[in-house]
Amino acid sequence: MNPAGEARPPPAICLVAGELSGDELGARLMKSLREERPDVVLRGVGGPAMTRQGLASLFPLTDIAVMGFLPVIARLPTVLARIRATADAVIANPPDALILIDAPDFTHRVARRVRRHLPSLPIIDYVSPKVWAWRPTRAKRMRPYIDEILALFPFEPAVHRRLGGPDCAYVGHPLIERLNVLRPSDEEMRARESGAPTIVILPGSRRFEISRLLGIFGRTVEIVARQSLGAEFILPAVAHLESEIRA
């Protein structure tokens, strides 16, 4: 209740993911936010996982989930238009906070546009850019438009303090919640005991990556299979591309 005795409106949070890995993070974040505040209003940009949590994305995530020089150039007009559309949607209907989820090439451009129009809006970056590995000057450059970073690794807050970056808090890596998935099953343990190798194939999660790389992976599998009898090959696939990968 506010001082006048009127009920406060539910909190509104805008989440912006830029690729499928961020979509998975965003979905878990949405679930956790609703556990804390069942009445929270969540909107923004996301993919299939966030959609399953009830997000009505402003546009399909595939519009902006591109990587590599030529694919980015080919999709640049669309990507720039989506940056403007996302920022304009936030500005037109300001939330209580804006949460960016990874994909800094997209999300940070949204943040800078929003900051110019809504200087007091809290902007949170979920997943720190790897300033500890390359381009360390990015940390300081983020300060004008990022208020808080939610870091996946425990050493990242100290890195941002040293580099002059925004406030940063360690929140843990989402894989901690899925350790049971990473442990070998009984079938996998038996395969190990038999001496047969298990080989994981990782062509990527973007359609253009798969279309360009899967043929190379396939030829490699043929070579390895001839030299290693009994090898088992595993190819994890995102759900919306599974049929294309199988084909």
Image (cartoon, grey):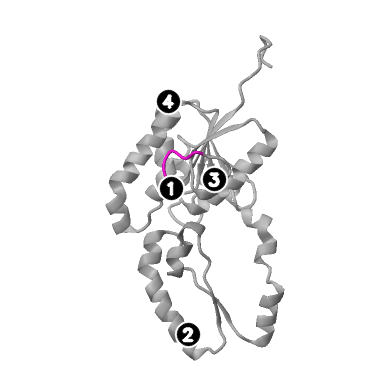
**Numbered disc 2: secondary structure:** helix
Sequence-first tag of 3 and 2: 3
Spatial CA distance of label 3 from label 2 is: 38 Å
Describe residue 81's horizontal placement relative to residue 120 as left or right: left
Judged by its main secondary structure, the magenta piece is loop
Name the residue type under label 4: Ala
Sequence-first tag of 4 and 2: 4
Residue at figure coordinates x 51%, y 46% from the top left: 163
Position of the C terminus, as image quadrant, is bottom left
Residue 156: mark in rendering: none
**Numbered disc 1: secondary structure:** helix
Name above or below for residue 80 compared with residue 136: above
Sequence-first tag of 1 and 4: 1
- Residue 112 in the image: state x and y as whole percent: 41, 35
Q: Are marks 3 and 4 in contact (CB under 8 Å)?
A: no
Spatial CA distance of label 1 from label 4 is: 21 Å
Region rendered in magenta: 56-61
Q: Are marks 3 and 2 in contact (CB under 8 Å)?
A: no
Describe residue 9's horizontal placement relative to residue 65 as left or right: right
Sequence-first tag of 3 and 4: 3
Position of the N terminus, as image quadrant, is top right
| Number of marks drawn | 4
Name the residue type under label 1: Leu
Residue 92: mark in rendering: 4
Residue at figure coordinates x 34%, y 45% from the top left: 79
Residue 50: mark in rendering: 3
Name the residue type under label 3: Met
- Residue 150 in the image: state x and y as whole percent: 58, 44
